[in-house]
Image: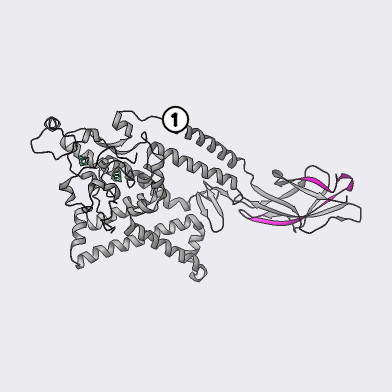
Amino acid sequence: MSNSPTQPRKDEDFHSQSPNQDINWEDYRDHLATADKDGHRRWLYPKKPSGKWFRWRTWFSWVLIALMFLGPWIRINGNPLLMINILERRFSILGQIFWPQDTVIFAVAMLVFITSIIIFTTAFGRLWCGWACPQTVMMEMVFRKIEYLIEGDSAEQRALDAAPWTAKKFLKKFSKQFIFLALSFIVGNTLFAYIVGSEKLLAIQFDDPRNHIVGLTFMCLFTLLFYGIFARFREQACTFICPYGRFMSAAIDENTLVVAYDYKRGEKRGPLHRGQSFDQRKAEGNGDCVACRQCVAVCPTGIDIRNGTQMECVNCTACIDACDTIMDKVGRPRGLIRFASLNNIEHGEKQCFTKRMLLYTVVLSALVSLFLFLVFTRAAVETTFLRAPGALFQQTAEGRIDNIYTVKVINKTSKDLPVEFKIENLAGSLRVMSPGQFIVPKEKLAQTSVIIELDPKRLTGASTKLEIGIYSGGKLLETVKTGFVGPR
Ligand code: SF4
Ligand code: SF4
């Protein structure tokens, strides 16, 4: 699919104004739309999009933005909706706390994630990038809109940048950068809250700064990082940094739905002359594309979708809206640029569920089932019950044999758990060496020592297998195995 369904064509009238005018359009695939022939960045001034798709995208974005900013503050069973605390190795997904020990669940979760991406990309191309990626959503729906509000649409922005510095220009530029920085601070803090948790974030913000030098440093770094991305780096992040864009090329095929130009209907492109009808155009060998370049003008990555599917396209649909508006004006049916597969455009085939997608779906369903099974059958605690290192067995005055054990219990729940131990497979006594009841605090690991005494008659050899039940409130949480040593 990386080979264009269309041949590159020149539009001389446009290239004279294009940011990419130094590019030889016959070998445009060797060039970036946002760089000149010397590799210098060409700043993009995408035109303000409008239309049906943009309205839907706006509504969807507001939902995502609300979710993104509220996410760290939403609690399920007292746990964050999502927290990826790499520093303390604590993770919360949909209110379920995961520990580094949950490696199998993590491995399956990663497989589910990767398989979902492959299936989604195979079916819908880079829909994620244009519609749900936080970078695009924040850039196009927040930062870009603020830019339009302060500096105006594409032409006004170009004029402002070209104009000499005046008090008005300074005020516009300064206020835009100030708002960008303030917003970047909020975005950076939100990401930070997803990492350290909202309570820790509040502590860093309101506690004595001397106690949180590292946290405050990260807050500043995150702010500067996002300011750099949204104020300057912009579409370059999608083109150069994001691995998903690179991966996309391997996942899509001729049945993948992408934003595509119907070259069969559009070519040969050419301006619509006054009084010219489309029947006349057709007779002259022209198609529906009137070479107005509105699809290029609105593109936030600076590409011309008429050259075919390209790595930079994030499927934002701005060009669909722009072209539909033109088609309405010239009285032709909408959809010259639309969501379509290569097979749909070339052969008129409807989107179909391919064998590859079927296979991926079967694998994904199996992985999701396994993941859910592991999550919902996961014990509330994880216990290691090992003989104390270096300790030998002892014989009591009554002739019984005792062993001492070190016990570590991880409480994966969000409430403190009083824990008891019982020998399940043999008669014997078990004493916990902690004073009072052994309580494992929520989301924490607690350790204690346990002495087990057995009648020598019960021993089956130098090492006897023991099964220990871990209980809380009379409920068996899990059973662990350990060994009991005695005389040969
Ligand atoms: S080509 Fe169209 S869909 Fe792709 S990034 Fe540009 S405007 Fe968005
Ligand atoms: S907006 Fe539509 S008609 Fe205009 S140049 Fe693009 S594809 Fe052609």
Describe the element under mark 1 as helix, strand or loop.
Answer: helix
Residue 424 sits in which quadrant?
A: top right
Q: How many marks?
A: 1
Q: In the rendered image, which quarter is residue 90 located in?
A: bottom right
Residue situated in front as seen by the camera: 150 or 362: 362
- Image check: 145 left or right of 129? left
- According to the image, label 1 marks what residue? 355
The kind of residue on which mark 1 rests is Lys
Residue at 57% in and 44% down:
105
Looking at the rendered image, the quarter that the N terminus falls into is top left
| Residue situated in front as seen by the camera: 166 or 24 | 24
Q: How far from the left and from the top, in percent, is residue 476? A: 70, 43
Q: Position of residue 414 (x, y in %)?
A: 59, 51
Q: Is residue 451 magenta?
A: yes
Q: Nearer the viewer, residue 280 or 94?
A: 280
Q: Quadrant of residue 267?
A: top left
Does residue 293 lie above or below 36 as drawn?
Answer: above
- Rendering quadrant holding ligand 1: top left
> In this rendering, does residue 162 appear at all?
yes
The part of the chain drawn in magenta is 440-467
Q: Position of residue 182 (x, y in %)?
A: 36, 61
Answer few, some or many: residues within 10 Å of disc 1's Cα (few below 14, many 20 plus, some between 14 and 19).
few
Q: Residue at x 51, y 53 (%)?
A: 84
